[in-house]
Amino acid sequence: MSSGLTIEPLKRTVFRVDVPCDQEMLFISDVHYDAMKCDRDLLTKHLTEAKKRGAAVFIFGDWFDLMQGKWDPRGTYSDLRPEYKSITYLDDVIEDSVQYFNQFKGTIRFLGRGNHETNIEKRMHTSPLDRVAALHNAAGGKITVGGYAGWLQVRIVRPDGKVRHTSYVHFHHGFGGNAPRSKGVLAVDLDQMQFPDADVIVRGHTHQKWYVPTTVDRITNVGNLYQQRVHHLRTGSYKLLGDRFAGWATEKGFNTPTLGGWWLKVGRNRKNETVQWEIQEAN
C-alpha cells in the first residue's frame, strides 16, 4: 500500500501529490477492462506487483471500454463479455470494476478520463469513473478522479513534514489517430514547447508505448546555468487486437498495441539537489 502518498486537488486540473523520497508509481492507461480482448492476467500481474512494491497506480484514461451500448458505432455484440449481456449493462460493468478495484485498496490512487469515459458522459449523462470511485472509496479505497488532462504537482516531503523538492507531471489522455508511422513521437517537441514546466509528460490513447528522454537548458534567478532531463512517456494498452477478422480497430487499420505501462520512482539527485526520476518499463 502506498501509505506515504497523498493526493489533494488544488484546481480542477491540478493535483498536489505529496510523496516520501524514492516513492514508486505505476503509470498506465487504455486498460479497457470490460472489453473481451482486455489482457486481465497482465493487468492483475502489474497491479499485484504495484501493491507489493508500495507503488501508487495512476490510470490516465480509458479504464473502461463500454462500446457495446446503444448508439455507439464502434460496438460489436460479439465483443460483449457474457457476464455483461444484461439490460443493466453499464451498471454491471461499474459494479464489476468496483469488485476488482477492492483487491487493490490504497494502491489504485488516480483515475483520469479518456475518450471512452467522456463518450459515456455525453451520451448517457453519467460519469462511470466517479461512480466507481465513490463505491470503491466507500469500501476503504483512496481514489481521486481527474479530467482528460491536467497537472500533478509532485512534492517530496521529508519525515518532519517539510517539502524538499517539487516536480511537475503533465498528463493528457491523448488525441488523434493511431499514428501508424510515427507512433506519436512527433508530438514530443510540440509538448516540450507547450508545457515547458513539466519534468514528466505522459500521454496515452494510441495504444503504442515509448519513452523519449530530452535535455533542456535552464537558468536560475541568480544566473546559474544547468541542464534538466524531461521524460516523455507514451503509455501502452491492455487491450489485445485479436486476429484482425473484423471490428473497429481492424477497419481503421490500427497498429498492433504495445501492452503495459511505466514504473517511475521519484527521488533527489544529491549532487545538485534536484528532483530525479527513474523510469522502467512495465511489460
Image (spheres, helix red, strand yellow):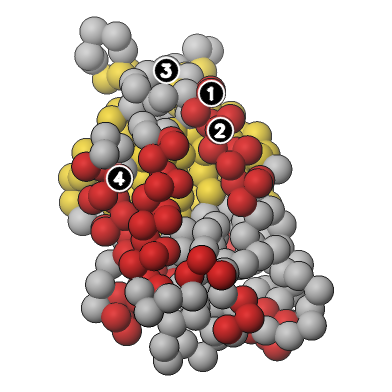
Is residue 230 positioned above or below 204 on the image? above
Quadrant of the frame with the N terminus: top left
Residue at 39% from the left image edge and 65% from the top image edge: 92
What type is the residue that disc 1 sits on? Lys
Badge 4 element? helix
Badge 2 element? helix
Q: Dot 4 corresponds to which residue?
A: 136
* Position in image of residue 16 (x %, y %): 26, 38
Disc 3 versus disc 1: distance between alpha carbons?
Answer: 18 Å
What type is the residue that disc 2 sits on? Thr
Q: Dot 3 corresponds to which residue?
A: 21
* Front tag of 3 and 1: 1
Q: Dot 1 corresponds to which residue?
A: 52
Q: Which residue is at the far top?
A: 160
Is residue 139 positioned above or below 49 on the image? below
96, 202: nearer the viewer: 96
Left or right, residue 235 beside residue 152: right
Residue at 29% from the left image edge and 9% from the top image edge: 159
Mark 1: few/some/many CA within 10 Å (<14, 14-19, 20+): few
Disc 2 versus disc 1: distance between alpha carbons?
Answer: 6 Å
Q: Quadrant of residue 146?
A: bottom left
